[in-house]
């Protein structure tokens, strides 16, 4: 653990203590509400400030954790090349079945081209515990919501995960 992480961990612990004291002062302020309005407002304000000061290190710690986990996911190999995405699930020249999960419109199309619809489908690789999402070609006519939940074939032309075709003629 480097110095930045140690300092962040200490701040998180101190923040937890400050947050707990802040919550205690807020509760105490409610108890004092019937006795003195000035004490009530004082306890509430100090408690709120301490609670915010206590939450801030937790947020910073969480952001640091996300940065570290994202850096690990995007790690580089020893040869200074980025680790390649696993494409072993792609059957080159073959196909897989994917579940249709929705239909969307292209809202960025100009008015002269008309409305375009896309079918979105998902393939779940249960061995690797990952999901892959695919989008069909554009269509001028709405295919109907009854296709949602059905299966469709996705054909692969190469090992490139973006080189596929969703065959809407194969909807089961």
Image (spheres, rainbow, N blue to C red):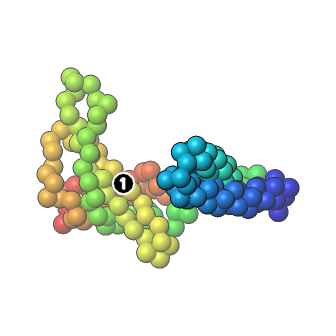
Q: Residue furthest right?
A: 3
What x and y, as percent, mark residue 31? 53, 58
Q: Is residue 1 left or right of residue 145?
A: right
Q: Is residue 162 left or right of residue 3?
A: left
| Residue hosting label 1 | 134
Vertically, is 38 above or below 98?
Answer: above
Based on the displayed image, in which of its 4 quarters is residue 107 positioned? top left
What x and y, as percent, mark residue 55? 63, 53
Q: Secondary structure at mark 1?
A: strand
Q: Classify the position of the C terminus by image quarter.
A: bottom left
Binning the other alpha carbons within 10 Å of mark 1 as few (below 14), some (14 to 19) or many (20 upward) gives many
Given residues 57 and 94, the one toward you in this image is: 57
Given residues 39 and 85, the one toward you in this image is: 39
Q: Who's the residue at 51% across and 67% down the image? A: 88
Q: Who's the residue at 16% across and 54% down the image? A: 145
Q: Classify the position of the N terminus by image quarter.
A: bottom right
**Picture mark count:** 1
**From this viewpoint, is residue 77 visible?**
no
Q: Is residue 141 left or right of residue 58?
A: left
What x and y, as percent, mark residue 15? 70, 56
Given residues 156 and 81, the one toward you in this image is: 81
**From this viewpoint, is residue 29 visible?**
yes
Q: Residue furthest bottom?
A: 127
Q: Who's the residue at 36% across and 54% down the image? A: 134
Given residues 33 and 62, the one toward you in this image is: 33
What x and y, as percent, mark residue 74? 65, 54
């Amino acid at each position: 653990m480097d110095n930045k992480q140690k300092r962040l961990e200490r701040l998180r612990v101190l923040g937890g203590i400050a947050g707990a004291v802040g919550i205690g002062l807020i509760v105490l302020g409610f108890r004092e509400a019937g006795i003195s309005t000035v004490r009530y407002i004082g306890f509430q304000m100090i408690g709120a400030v301490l609670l915010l000061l206590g939450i801030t290190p937790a947020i910073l710690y969480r952001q640091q954790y996300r940065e570290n986990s994202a850096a690990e996911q995007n790690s580089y190999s020893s040869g200074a090349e980025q680790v390649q995405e696993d494409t072993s699930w792609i059957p080159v020249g073959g196909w897989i079945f994917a579940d249709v999960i929705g239909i969307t419109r292209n809202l960025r199309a100009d008015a002269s081209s008309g409305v375009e619809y896309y079918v979105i489908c998902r393939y779940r690789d249960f061995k690797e515990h990952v999901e892959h999402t695919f989008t069909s070609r554009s269509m001028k006519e709405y295919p109907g919501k009854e296709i949602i939940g059905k299966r469709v074939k996705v054909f692969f032309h190469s090992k490139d995960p973006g080189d596929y075709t969703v065959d809407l003629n194969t909807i089961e």
